[in-house]
Amino acid sequence: MNAALSAGRLGAILAKEFVQMRRDRITFAMMLVVPIVQLLLFGFAINNDPKGLPAAILALGQDRYTRAVVSALEVSGYYRFERRPESAAEAESLMARGAISFLVTIPSDFGTRVERADAPRILVEADATDPAASSGAVASLQTVANRALLRAQGLQAATKEQDEGSLSFVVHRRYNPEGITQYNIVPGLLGVILQMTMVMMTAMALTREIERGTMENLLAMPATASEIMLGKVLPYLAVGCVQVAVVLSAAKLLFGVPFLGGLALLLGSVLIFVLALVLLGYTISTVARTQLQAMQLTFFFFLPSLLLSGFMFPFAGMPGWAQSLGELFPLTHFLRVIRAIMLKGAGLDDVGREVFYLAVFVPAYAGLALMRFRSTLD
Amino acid sequence: MNTSENALVNAIDVRGLTKRFGTRTVVDNVDLSVAPGEIVGFLGPNGSGKTTTIRLICGLLTPDAGEGTVLGLDVRTQSAAIKRQVGYMTQRFSFYEDLTIEENLTFVARLYGLKPRAAAVARTLEGLGLSSRKDQLAGTLSGGWKQRLALAACIMHEPRLLLLDEPTAGVDPKARREFWDEIHRLAGDGLTVLVSTHYMDEAERCHRIGYIAYGRMLATGTVDEVVSGSGLVTFVVHGSLKPAQIREIAAADGVEQVAPFGTTLHVVGTDREKLEAALAPLAQQPDIKVEPGETSLEDVFIKFMTGAQDRAA
Ligand SMILES: Nc1ncnc2c1ncn2[C@@H]1O[C@H](COP(=O)(O)OP(=O)(O)OP(=O)(O)O)[C@@H](O)[C@H]1O
Ligand SMILES: [Mg+2]
């Protein structure tokens, strides 16, 4: 009888919540219409143009030309060449995980080809899941490298400009060769839409009971804190699943976004994310006293998470403090996971770490909510 | 604690109960004992702390001071167990207005794990006479019917203690009569009832009453005990009096309350001799008759209220 979780009582709350959800037609309609409206609005409207993306150089040769190009690129300031992978395989995995947006590979015969004026080439691989970011950056990369090379050869840029044997860049747009913006936006939108509706709805969970005066009665009856919490968030988990189905279908049918990774991993991660969101909303509702407050708190949370998660602007382009702050939002981790899975075909090996971070939010929010929950009216 | 011991223990036995909101002491050192099967009326002016005291008893508020037992369980530490055996009817209707009558009852039945559930719900609907309206949204019920639904819902799980916070506010006289008959029937079966009310006639239907003002329990006992304990003396003046005469009496030494009732005037005071002296000139007049009357509970409460106010000021 005294158990923290009884199926019977939990069932009671679940049934009651479903009935109330069904009866609140406006809210119910909003939950289905809002995702579609937002999807169309943001999906077509949002574009971005970032600077300072993380990049890596894979320099296979040790000659002076290679060194000149490398150091020129490093000091250029356009990019952050933070990593020097040892091998092609290491570089490849950095990109799949999303640790770098660019990989510049300087072949081992680069130096000899420069001396022989035998069409030296540099390979640039760009993570084109964010096409706006990659296209602008590639162009400036070319200018910097060219200038550095000419200086190393002791030549003036102007005289050697259109030469036969001059440096050429081979650019590979990885994951999204046609550079379609929607590929990047739409999976992100899934996260944003879910966050918006799930958090807002569950943030009202307790405040609605308080405002309608039903909380006093509920608390006077033998329902435990965890039963009330689960009873209130699980129905919205179900709504979230419907939303996921709607948005993913739209992504496929309307925008033709690729689904490279495994569906099970994708849905599993989404489920964890939605669970974290409904618990976050519930946590907000244990803090707020009124529905209005709950609403305000939700927006309070919503805006920064939108700006700092990498949805609006590339995460890597943000200053360090903003990145640290961004790590605190479930959306940040979800975006990395879903983009990696959908666009790069990443598996559990690649995104396991991020999925784990995402999962940490679930017990964290649940614990916080249970701690904050007041089973008295004090 | 075994059951035979439980039966001897008071259903409510709290001492020194105190609750503060901020710096305001809303319930101040309240002692209350209620024997099993007893119906205790809880009276007091608005804002005197009745609802707060009831919430303290059923564990919805944590006392700042005080201790005691409810149904033999510690009021401070065992509120989860207390909740399971207590039926609490809130002052404000607090069932779900967007659920139907039946859905509300089903919700309660499931939370308490009543079995068989459908039968329990059907029985309650039957008892309410609402079987035919079971699909009506609770929010669309009239005020009086909401009260009846709430009462029915909070006795569904057969609690041992019933805490009713102004259960008959806004209920018509016939329904009120039925309501009190039901309360007495339940008490006859051993249920203990603590009921707050503003109605004097309801107070008189209780075995005992407690009177609270400004958070302090000023009197407890049977109605007769409370009335005699007040030390008030009442005289009834028959005959038509001019307003000036009434003002004169009210201002006289020893007269504490003057209340016209139809063609009579109730004059109340503590000191019998002073009161008689004040009324002596009237008694001389031919068309006016002065005789000793019965002090009513209302007179007593008004005295309490004025007294408590003076102390609070
Ligand atoms: N949560 C609260 N926070 C602050 N003050 C409160 C709170 N609850 C009650 N009070 C105050 O405590 C006092 C007693 O309130 P309570 O509701 O117990 O009175 P009551 O005797 O039930 O009155 P009524 O007859 O009007 O129902 C009131 O002055 C009220 O304003
Ligand atoms: Mg009250």
Image (tube, rainbow, N blue to C red):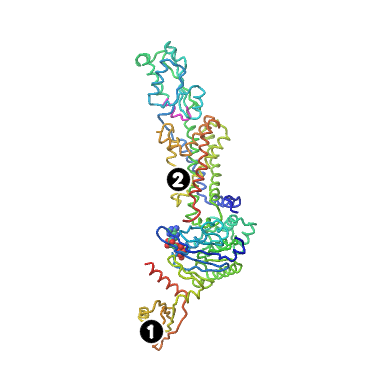
Measured Cα–Cα span from mark 2 to mark 1 = 73 Å
Closest to the camera, between mark 2 and mark 1, is 1
Camera sees residue B200: yes
Whether residue B44 is situated above or below residue A56 in the rendered picture: below
Residue denoted by label 1: B277
Residue denoted by label 2: A298
Instruction: Say yes or no: labels 2 and 1 on the same chain.
Output: no
Q: Chain of mark 2?
A: A
Question: Where is residue B232 drawn, in percent x and y?
Answer: 44, 77
Whether residue A163 is situated above or below residue B298 in the rendered picture: above
The local secondary structure at tag 2 comes to helix
Magenta stretch, residue numbers: A127-137
Does A305 appear in magenta? no
**Residue type at tag 1:** Ala
- Mark 2 is surrounded, within 10 Å at the Cα level, by few (under 14), some (14 to 19) or many (20 or more) other residues, namely many
Question: Where is residue B212 drawn, in percent x and y?
Answer: 46, 67
Question: Where is residue B63 drawn, in percent x and y?
Answer: 47, 59
**Residue type at tag 2:** Thr
Q: Quadrant of residue A304?
A: top left
- Mark 1 is surrounded, within 10 Å at the Cα level, by few (under 14), some (14 to 19) or many (20 or more) other residues, namely few
Whether residue B274 is situated above or below residue B94 in the rendered picture: below
For the N terminus of chain B, give its image quadrant. bottom right
Q: Chain of mark 1?
A: B
Does A134 appear in magenta? yes
Residue A372, disc: none
Query: Which residue shows up at 42% across the image and 83% down it?
Result: B237
Q: Choose between B26 and A252: the one closer to the eye.
A: B26
Question: Where is residue B73 drawn, in percent x and y?
Answer: 55, 60
Whether residue A271 is situated above or below residue B30 in the rendered picture: above
Count of marks overlaid on the render: 2
The local secondary structure at tag 1 comes to helix
Query: Is mark 2 in CB contact (under 8 Å) with mark 1?
Result: no
